[in-house]
Amino acid sequence: MQNACCPNPRGVRSCPSMFFRVPARIASEALLAFLRCVQLNELAEVMTSRTEPLEDLGRYSEFVIAMSSTVVTQSPHLMAPLVRCLASDLSSMYEAQRIAAVAFYGELVRHRCAGSVPLIETLLNSLVSRLIDSSPVVRRLCLLGLGHISCLGHPGGFGVDYTQLVDLFAQQVMSAMLGGLDDREDVGGSIPLQAMTALAGVLRVVSEQQVQHTLIPITIRIRVYFESESLALRSTSFGLFGACSAFCQGPLREPPVAVFVGVAWRVS
């Protein structure tokens, strides 16, 4: 007897439901059911609050970041196990898996990993290692995560001093941002924009000694964005220029001040 849904015994061409199964949707529904089953209701709520499709990699990364933030605030005991679980995905052949890993790692840095300094160090090293990724989305998310060391420069609620950690990674992070300023593979300029935004934050927590060798390279690289057609790139580059000019005093006044005067004169 033939199946009522598929009367054609040689195939399933007449079964419409077989052609509209979206793997991403099935995976999302399975994850939602699992979260509810183990009573992780806060994470389930994040999933149900986002109705837009996740096939777009930009929206997908935003979803991962939202989930990561909830993990830190509501289920901090899951951080370390999830970090270990996602470690292999950093080098996955699938772009979406690499995006999920770096987005999760970066958001944990923003939340200071609930005070776990060793875990933060592991995450920062992992983000640095993926700056060479072939995906511009992954590279942008790495810059986003590394830029979150600016959150470590402010007093936190975990009774932890992150000064040594900031000092340890300051040069690596600023070098990564310099590389991001030259990364124009993404047509929309999202990588340079992220690099400039992150640098403006990082400059608030580093010392004059740490920034003295990167100050002039930064100003030289951002000049190209002063006349960009993108309003976001123009405004962010001028904001970063102002943040850099704050260091043109005291022992760092010469020679950077000459560069800043020349740039300001050129764009005025």
Image (cartoon, rainbow, N blue to C red):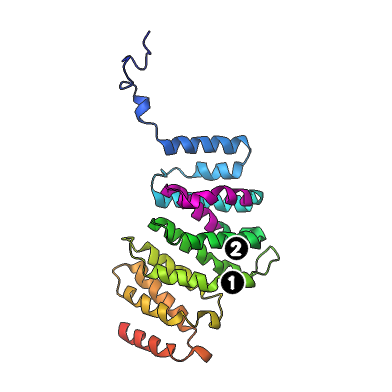
In the image shown, does 38 or 174 lie closer to the viewer?
174
The disc, 2 or 1, on the residue closer to the chain's N-terminal end is 2
Residue underneath mark 1: 168
- Name the residue carrying label 2: 121
Residue range highlighted in magenta = 79-107
Is residue 243 in the magenta section? no
Q: Quadrant of residue 217?
A: bottom left
Question: Taking 187 as reference, is 243 left or right?
Answer: right
| Disc 1 packing (10 Å; few <14; some 14–19; many ≥20) | few
The residue positioned 51% from the left and 35% from the top of the image is 30
Residue 58 left/right relative to 64 = left
- Dot 2: within a 10 Å radius of its alpha carbon, few (fewer than 14), some, or many (20 or more) residues? some
- From the top left corner, tell me how far across and down residue 172 is, in percent: 51, 70
Q: Residue furthest top?
A: 1
The quadrant of the rendering that contains the N terminus is top left
The amino acid type, in three-letter code, at marker 2 is Glu
User: Where's residue 154, x and y in %?
Assistant: 61, 70
Element type where label 2 sits in the image:
helix
* Residue 212 visible in rendering: yes
Tell me the element at label 1: helix
CB atoms of marks 2 and 1 within 8 Å: yes
Classify the position of the C terminus by image quarter. Answer: bottom left
Instruction: Say which residue appears at 37% left-offset and 17% top-offset.
Output: 5
Which numbered circle lies on residue 71? none
Q: Residue at x 59, y 36 (%)?
A: 36
Circle count: 2
Front residue of this view, candidates 177 and 131: 131
- The x, y position of residue 120, in whole percent, is 60, 61
Which amino acid is tagged 1? Answer: Leu
Q: Is residue 95 magenta?
A: yes
Predominant secondary structure, magenta span: helix
Q: As displayed, is residue 14 above or below residue 238?
A: above
